[in-house]
Image (tube, grey):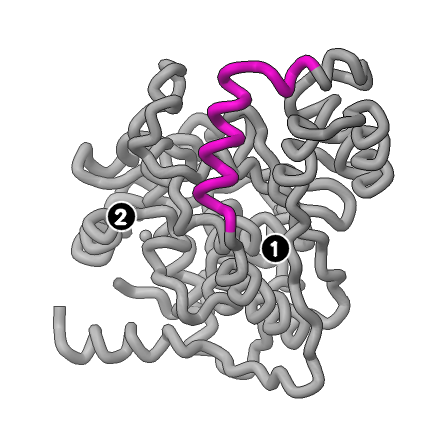
Amino acid sequence: MKKYFLITLLTLFLFSCTNEKRKADLTGIDFEIKIQRFDKDFWALKTSKNQAEDLQKLYEKYPDFAPLYFNHIIYLGDDKELILKFINDTVADKLYSDVLKKFDDVEKIEKQLTNAFRRGHYFFPQLSVPQCVMCVSLLNQNVIVSDSLIALGIDKYLGADYPLYELSPENYPYLLANWRPEKVVSDYIFAWLSTEFEFDPQSERLLDEMIYKGKILYLTSLLLPKEKEETIMGYSPEQWKWCKKYERDMWQTLIQQKHLFSTDYFLHIKYLNDAPFTQPFSQESPGRAGVFIGWQIIESYMKNNPEVTPLQLMQNADAQGIFEKSGYQP
């Protein structure tokens, strides 16, 4: 069944050392990642002399993704006449034109993904490397995950100031901040890791979800050692600095309010979901600051337990045990 789907000089020194993380020997791991440009192939129909025939060839080239795209992403179904009419839609034309111009050359992205997935293969040789696809989702989805396939709705990576984003009142500024090209690579990797290592908590406590999300961010940074941590987190440099500055205060709030072991679903949302700020902390905080704390706990755990491999980390479902052995003390 298919699945659709955030001082002292010493402190600064220690923190910078963690950026190197675990080294990976990539000898003999020589596959290349090539992004499948469904966006380009589909929009080529616009100038095709035999659109019906070339549309059928598109289905044959993308036997898994084409049906998913037309049925579940842009919601046109299998009506080929309707699909061909869609090519002349004004908004679609604008989106496709801007996307194909912005992402005409993705060689740099492919090189980054190649290195990341090679590192992923080193640490997790049992995992399959997915097909990476780009499409235009009509601003519906950022990331689409199916069996052995990850697609990005690349029209949601054009920059926060892209004019068409303002057409929907639901495109809040705190969401638009991450609709930028810099997020493409880490979103591919984050989606892959989230799919391969699904959330299967032993309990419904806030701690369990914080630890899980922290694990995925840790692994993402492990596979992308040259990527800025604030980019992986989805923060601006200012938001990241705020979290580092007030990390101890946020942690004290979690402990004093006895929220860490809470099973209150709505409290989880306040700490972990996208929002203008993290409500239990302060209005100056960025959203999802609870996820930031979860990441820092994992960083501390892996630093203080060097014998633990990344695979063993992911196989360990004991969130409280990880927390207790992390020595986390901001």
Residue 102 locus on image (x, y percent):
44, 43
Q: In which quarter of the image is residue 258?
A: top left
Asked if the residue under mark 2 is in contact with the one under mark 1, i.e. CB atoms within 8 Å, the reply is no
Q: Can residue 39 be seen in this view?
A: yes
- The quarter of the image holding the C terminus is bottom left
Marks 1/2: CA distance?
23 Å
- Residue 12 versus residue 184: which sits nearer the camera? 184
Residue 136 locus on image (x, y percent):
57, 32
- Residue type (three-letter) at the residue carrying disc 2: Ser
Badge 2: residue crowd in 10 Å (few <14, some 14–19, many ≥20): some
Q: Mark 1 points at which residue?
A: 193
Observer-side mark, 1 or 2, equals 2
Residue 321 locus on image (x, y percent):
53, 62
Residue occupying image coordinates x 62% and y 62%:
314
Q: Look at the magenta stretch and give its main secondary structure.
A: helix
Magenta extent: 85-104
Q: Mark 2 points at which residue?
A: 236
- Residue 215 versus residue 91: which sits nearer the camera? 91
| Residue 89 colored in magenta in the image | yes
- Residue type (three-letter) at the residue carrying disc 1: Leu
How many numbered discs, if any? 2
Vertically, is 76 above or below 40? above
